[in-house]
């Protein structure tokens, strides 16, 4: 990460501190993709991740093949590595 020195030359500038607060996962090296397997059709595929949405995420996304919904869980560590898991969105629903 490139840092500019503040006016004293002894620390980061205010704009660098603002960027660190806005993008807490570091220097832009956070994972942007993950490989997953659909819990319904068992097809493997890549999904796009959004590190700007926070270090802990949970959302619903449809399978690119069978169109059934998954719940996606994403956790970014301090190095920007993503731990991604998915489960059937209707898991636990009774039919």
Image (cartoon, helix red, strand yellow):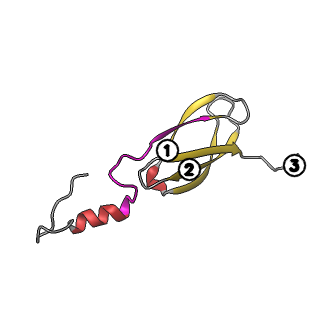
State the image quarter where residue 45 is shown.
top right
Tell me if residue 78 comes above or below residue 43 in the rendering.
Answer: below
Residue lying at 61% horizontally and 29% vertically, measured from the top left: 44
For marks 1 and 3, give the CA distance. Answer: 30 Å
Q: Mark 1 highlights which residue?
A: 49
Measured Cα–Cα span from mark 1 to mark 2: 8 Å
Q: Tags 3 and 2 in contact by the CB under 8 Å rule?
A: no
* Residue 86 rendering spot, x and y as whole percentages: 65, 44
Answer whether residue 28 is magenta in the image: yes
Where disc 1 sits, the SS reads: loop
Quarter of the rendering occupied by the C terminus = top right
Above or below, 9 against 90 in this view is below
Numbered circle sitting on residue 74: 2
Q: Residue at x 40, y 55 (%)?
A: 25
Segment colored magenta: 22-36
CB atoms of marks 1 and 2 within 8 Å: yes
Q: Main secondary structure of the magenta part?
A: loop
Give whichever of 22, 10 is nearer the camera: 10
The local crowd at label 1, few if under 14, some if 14 to 19, many if 20 or more residues have their Cα within 10 Å, is: some
Is 81 on the left or on the right of 45, as rendered? left
Give me the residue at 65% from left, 29% from top. Answer: 65
Q: Which residue is mark 3?
A: 94
Q: Secondary structure at mark 2?
A: strand
Front residue of this view, candidates 55 and 50: 55
Q: Earlier in the sequence, mark 1 or mark 3?
A: 1
Give me the C-alpha separation between circle 3 and circle 2: 26 Å
């Amino acid at each position: 990460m490139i840092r500019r020195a503040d006016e004293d030359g002894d620390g980061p500038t205010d704009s660098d501190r603002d960027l660190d607060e806005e993008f807490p996962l570091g220097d832009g090296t956070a994972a942007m993709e993950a490989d997953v397997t659909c819990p319904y059709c068992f097809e493997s595929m890549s999904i796009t991740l959004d590190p700007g949405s926070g270090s802990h995420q949970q959302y619903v996304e449809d399978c690119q093949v069978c169109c059934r919904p998954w719940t996606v869980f994403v956790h970014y560590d301090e190095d920007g590595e993503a731990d991604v898991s998915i489960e059937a969105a209707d898991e636990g629903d009774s039919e």
